[in-house]
Amino acid sequence: MTTWAIEIPVLFVLVRYAFRDRTLPTLRIVFTGALCTALTLPYLWFVLPPYVDAAYYPLIGESLVVVAEAVILNRLLGLKWPVAGVCSLVMNAASFFLGLFLL
């Protein structure tokens, strides 16, 4: 739930204000942001850990999530690849670092 509370508003602000896209409906941005987390978080927490050394887990896990979410943002919101990549990177960096702060 915390991840959604961080990543969805970050995505909305990036799309609307940083990249100035006023054509995408708000509900579509929110749904896509929620879907990104819903599709990647279970793999990051429950599927990936047995296959990746703990020392490299944050780097590998978060990198895979950024790539996967960029694909989702590109396909569902029609964001260009660089924009989708930046949005995904910033969303995940925000939730990762705020998650560390909240722990």
Image (tube, helix red, strand yellow):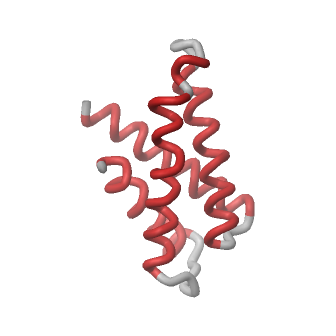
Residue 77: image quadrant is: bottom right
Which residue reaches farthest bottom?
23
Check the image and report above or below for 32 versus 56: below
Q: Measuring from the top left, give residue 1's x and y in whole percent.
A: 30, 50
Q: In this figure, what is the number of numbered marks?
A: 0
In this rendered view, identify the residue nearer to me: 46 or 12.
46
Which residue corresponds to the image point at 48% horizontal and 62% vertical from the top-left? 33
Check the image and report above or below for 26 versus 91: below
Q: Measuring from the top left, give residue 5's x and y in whole percent.
A: 32, 56
In this rendered view, identify the residue nearer to me: 100 or 2.
2
In this rendered view, identify the residue nearer to me: 90 or 40.
40
Which residue corresponds to the image point at 47% horizontal and 51% vertical from the top-left? 37
Q: Is residue 101 left or right of residue 75?
A: left
Residue 73: image quadrant is: bottom right
Q: Is residue 54 left or right of residue 100?
A: right
Q: Measuring from the top left, give residue 36's x and y in whole percent.
A: 52, 55
In this rendered view, identify the residue nearer to me: 17 or 4.
4
Which residue reaches farthest right?
81
Which residue reaches farthest left?
102
Check the image and report above or below for 28 versus 75: below
Which residue corresponds to the image point at 42% horizontal and 55% vertical from the top-left? 7
Q: Measuring from the top left, give residue 20's x and y in whole percent.
A: 57, 78
Which residue corresponds to the image point at 58% horizontal and 13% vertical from the top-left? 53
Q: Looking at the figure, which quarter contains the C terminus?
A: top left
